[in-house]
Amino acid sequence: MSTVLQLKNITKTYGDMRALSGIDLALPGDAYISLLGPSGSGKTTLLRVIAGFEHPDGGAILFDGKRIDTVAPHQRGIGFVFQNFALFPHLSVAQNIAFGLENRDVDPVTDRRVVDARVRDIISLVGLSGLEGRAVTQISGGQRQRVALARTLVTEPRMVLLDEPLGALDANLRARMRAELRAIRERCGVTFLHVTGSEAEALAMGDTVLVLESGRIAQSADSDTVYNRPASPAVARFLNCYNLFPGRIEGGTFVGGVGRFALGSGAPTRAASPAYAIRYDRVAVRPREAATAEDEIRIEANFVASEYSGAAVNSFFALDDGRVFEVESHLSHAAPETYAEQGRYALVWKREDALVYA
Amino acid sequence: MNASGIKTGLGAYTALFLVFLYGPLVVLAILSFQTGPEGGPQFPIIEWSTYWYKHLFGLTPPSRIAPLPIEQALVRSLGLAVMTMIVSTVLGVTAAQAFRRKFRGSGVVFYLIVLGMMVPGVLVGLGMALVANTLGIDRHWWSTAFVLHVVYTFPFAFLVMLAIFNRFDPSMEEASWSLGVTPARTFRKVTFPLIFPGVLSAMLFAFTLSYDEFSRTLFASGRDLTLPLAIYGTFSVEVHPNVFAFGVLTTLFSFALLGTYAALMMLSVRRAKRIAIQEEA
């Protein structure tokens, strides 16, 4: 796969705050890439630097092999879809979509019929037929999202940057638009770089998932790898599905605040600080007196509360050092257990299921 | 004091406020219908008539009361107000656009601009007269007075536009750039249409402030008088109801301006609605 966009050691600071501290990445053409990061990790800044709305303090941006870090935004040929959509309120749906075609500096389309035909095509592609003449203030959030997308896609950019494009939609619509965004992208054959703060969205949508952590790319891999083998404790924490223990490694065991865990056969992942991670759904809750197998790790904790989310129940336990430990039980596997409040239980997982960072 | 007491008190205060606001105007309007040429500028109304309105336009038989010497002053004032409006609005819009980004010394520049509306008009007018004399420049309504009018009205236009830009979402401009549209064309096609209501307000401010500016013009306009000066000049001889009639007419003119402004504003709002209604039907 050819590389469309390449960033080399991009840095950006605001006053004393380092928003981006040395970003290196290469994005392939014709792919859906999601960029996941907690708020304040610099993801919007990164997008704005790529679009040219902000100037990086250092580093190089190559687009199609050419350096573009000094090129004005309107000459970059990179589309941008804003979280608030940023539609032109004084123009109708069709006029919004035609705006770029008619007004762009390079190769504007002046033939009314050509513009109309291309607007018609893109309107049917994004599913907005019948709304052409509407004012953009008179359509729903999901429709506005489509107008924003259509307005960008009709100009045929090689790459589209999407800044939390589903953030302003309600949950129902968000789930539907995920599938649609993927389908639309496949039909257009352009690269989408989709910024999101939601791990579920990033994992569901990206062919490649980039995880941004305090101004650096912490991991770049496919969804499965990111989810199952987060590259660092920070990534694991951000995925919101791992219990993390800080501590240190001594011989064949991990020494943490609540005990010593025997390590599995795999080598620990290299990380800045040692940590031990076990996924919420890999933990079993058993009565205190239940037996533990040879290859299992066992700790004890007090039950605090549980939260029902339809397909699963998340139970929260307080460990002896005060930390909260979360267990996710999928209801398709077993009927939900009821635990006694403040009752003491054994939390058990297989040694091999844990991820160890050293 | 209970709630209804406060309500009554505030109501009375508002009523009193309105009386003081419109009272003089109403008295003026009533007296302008005094009979002429013998009726004077005081109550009681001897007989209702439109004599003084006709007198303004020279439609009455000659009498001892000279017609108001305002025809040329009116043209001058209108011309000056239009010139001031154009220049101040352009300056106001461009300056406010510059202030959207912080630049070095922006605080100082801000106060320098706003100073123009703060300093006492008489002093500025006098200062301008002295400067003109020292430099040997002739004073005219279209030169020295015009400059002072711009200095005075530009801050108003600037502040109006600053408020408008404050609420303006810059991502709309960025969206336009990312579609390949140059910043200049983006300003024309996106920014300007959206700030247009603000531009109209700035124009209205500049026009009306310039149109009845007195103190600055007094010293700076030289021989040819503007309308406020000409009207003031007539007071020094003897006041006749023809001045009141003229006052009523200029007030009506101001209302017409406001009406045009409101109509232009409504038009842009209704356009958006009409499109929506057509779709619903």
Image (cartoon, coloured by chain):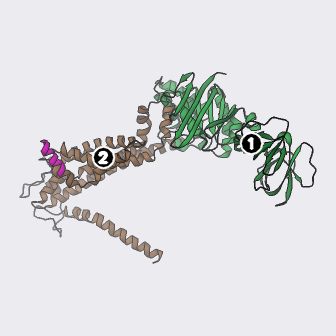
Chain colours: A green, B brown
Q: Amino acid at mark 1?
A: Pro
Question: Considering depth in this image, is B12 or A312 the residue closer to the camera?
Answer: A312
Position in image of residue A44 (x %, y %): 57, 39
Q: Amino acid at mark 2?
A: Phe
Label 1 crowd (10 A; few <14 / some 14-19 / many >=20): many
Could you tell whether B191 is left or right of B41 in the image?
Answer: right
Question: Considering depth in this image, is A216 or A26 the residue closer to the camera?
Answer: A216
Question: Mark 2 highlights which residue?
Answer: B154
Magenta-highlighted stretch: main secondary structure?
helix
Residue A78 seen by the camera: yes
Position in image of residue A97 (x %, y %): 53, 33
Residue B260, relative to residue A56: is it above or below? below
Label 2 close to label 1 by CB (< 8 Å): no
Residue A220, relative to residue B54: is it above or below? above
Position in image of residue A351 (x %, y %): 86, 42
| Residue placed furthest toward the left | B64
Question: Mark 1 highlights which residue?
Answer: A274
Could you tell whether A158 is left or right of B266 in the image?
Answer: right
Quarter holding residue A205: top right
Q: Which residues are magenta?
A: B126-138
Question: Considering depth in this image, is A290 or A162 the residue closer to the camera?
Answer: A290
> In which chain is the residue bearing label 1?
A
> In which chain is the residue bearing label 2?
B
Label 2 crowd (10 A; few <14 / some 14-19 / many >=20): many
Could you tell whether B254 is left or right of A51 in the image?
Answer: left
